[in-house]
Image (cartoon, rainbow, N blue to C red):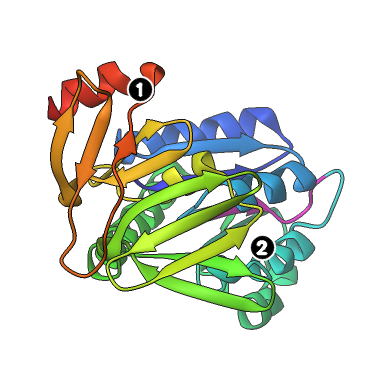
Amino acid sequence: MTKIMIVEDDIIIAKGLDSIIKSVDEDIETTITPYSKEALEYANDWQYDLFFLDIQLLDYSGYELAKQIRNIDRYKLTLIVFITAIPNKELSAFKEIHCYDYIIKPFKDKEVIEIVKTLVGYCGIEEEKDNFIKFKQGSYMYKVNTKDIIYIESIHKKIKVTMDKEQIEVNNYTLYRVLNELPEDDFIQCHKSFIINRNYIKKINLAKNLIELSSANVQVPKVPIGRKYKENLAGRYG
């Protein structure tokens, strides 16, 4: 699913843009906020494929917000489109911020639709081609192929990612955040402390609330099934 953030302090313009975007593809998920601080919090907690940024926000410069988004490692190359009333001032941003395009207020539906169709197609190609998730630990960045992840466990304020040939631990991540960055068809949360990759499931024992995972290269413990997650798990794999 493609996720798009709209940062615009004019609620009428924001809702209009949201409506146009969703007319392109009903599977597009949008987040709307008028605040730069809130936008950065969302960007850190979720994974977005495209940003529409108003260049002149009430509380901040959209141009500066774009630079801060670019400072987040996973958004170095993410697509950014500026919303502006004065296009000439934004031309310098194309080189420094590497934004894709800009739309001029009042924009036309057709213009936005063409941009979104092009970019949603681009995002889809990238997701199919490059199915990775990134984890940051201090000054290190781990780029992990999601196909290699067997399960992810939350332990206090860190998570442990067990893969087919190695294991990493990273701080300040939540399962909720990670689950939203993983392929929905391949991963499911089975317990408040565990996310599993369905491709490694060997056996599900609903009577004992346990899942047996298998891997050729690593010994994997049985993973518990939480009562809250049992019905969903049974519906998908039972």
Disc 2 marks which amino acid?
A: Ile
Any part of residue 105 in sight? no
Task: Measuring from the top left, give residue 180's x and y in whole percent.
Answer: 44, 43
Q: Along the polypeptide, which appears first: circle 2 or circle 1?
A: 2
> Which is in the foreground here, disc 2 or disc 1?
1
- The percent position of residue 118, horizontal first and vertical second, equals 32, 60
Q: Nearer the viewer, residue 54 or 221?
A: 221
Q: Nearer the viewer, residue 9 or 228?
A: 228
Q: Quadrant of residue 137?
A: bottom right
Disc 1 residue type? Answer: Tyr
Residue drawn at point x = 68 percent, y = 74 percent:
93
- At a point 56% along the width and 75% down the height, the residue shown is 141
Quarter of the image for the C terminus: give it: top left
Say left or right for 193 vs 163: right
Percent coordinates x, y for residue 121 in the rendering:
28, 59
Name the secondary structure under disc 2.
helix
Residue 37: x, y in percent?
A: 79, 46
Decide: is 216 above or below 238.
below
Left or right: residue 90 versus residue 113 is right
Q: Is residue 117 above or below residue 185?
A: below
Q: How many marks?
A: 2
Numbered range of the magenta stretch: 51-57
Left or right: residue 224 versus residue 57 is left
Label 2 belongs to which residue? 69
Q: Residue at x 27, y 21 (%)?
A: 232
Callout 2: few (<14), some (14-19), or many (20+) C-alpha neighbours within 10 Å?
many
The quadrant in which residue 120 appears is bottom left
**In the image, residue 54 above or below residue 12:** below
* Towards the viewer: 26 or 207: 207
**Residue at numbered disc 1:** 229
- 235 within the magenta span: no
